[in-house]
Amino acid sequence: MNLDQLLQISALLDFYGGMLTENQRLITRSYIDYNASLAEIAAQNGTTRQAVGDVVRRSVKKLEELESRLNLVKKYNSILVKIPALSKKLTQDAVSQEKISFEFEQLFKTLED
């Protein structure tokens, strides 16, 4: 996995990790976030490297399926991109407070959808 994929899976774990079993969550987090090898995780859990790899693959697949249905990470990232622009507008005198409030409300509606 490349760095972008690891970061994406880490974000998915943050958003949807609660939907995994505790074992799936711990093993996947160890592998993705803490860069532990399959052999290290297997030794800690008294299992095989293949079993750990299977858990990671199944967990990642489940996380990706949840994101494809719910799009929470996508919505969150789109909002993060818009916030600096709105913050910049706050410092400009020509922009009305009402307009900025409306734009923030639109961002929050995006989260609700």
Image (cartoon, rainbow, N blue to C red):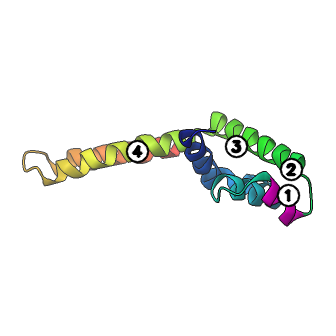
- Answer yes or no: do the residues labelled 2 and 4 have beta carbons within 8 Å? no
Among the two numbered marks 4 and 3 on one chain, the one whose residue lies closer to the N terminus: 3
Q: Magenta stretch: residue 72 in it?
A: no
Mark 1 Cα within 10 Å, few/some/many (few <14, many 20+)?
some
Residue 42 is labelled as 1
Q: Amino acid at mark 4?
A: Ile
Residue 49 is labelled as 2
The image shows residue 92 at horizontal and vertical percentages of 10, 49
CA separation in Å, label 2 and label 4 = 39 Å
CA separation in Å, label 3 and label 2 = 21 Å
Q: Secondary structure at mark 2?
A: helix
Which SS type dominates the magenta stretch? helix
Q: Secondary structure at mark 4?
A: helix
Q: Quadrant of the N terminus?
A: top right
CA separation in Å, label 4 and label 3 = 21 Å
- Answer yes or no: do the residues labelled 2 and 1 have beta carbons within 8 Å? yes
The magenta stretch is 39-45
CA separation in Å, label 4 and label 1 = 38 Å
Q: Secondary structure at mark 3?
A: helix
CA separation in Å, label 2 and label 1 = 5 Å
Residue 75 is labelled as none
Residue 79 is labelled as 4
For disc 3, the marked residue is 63
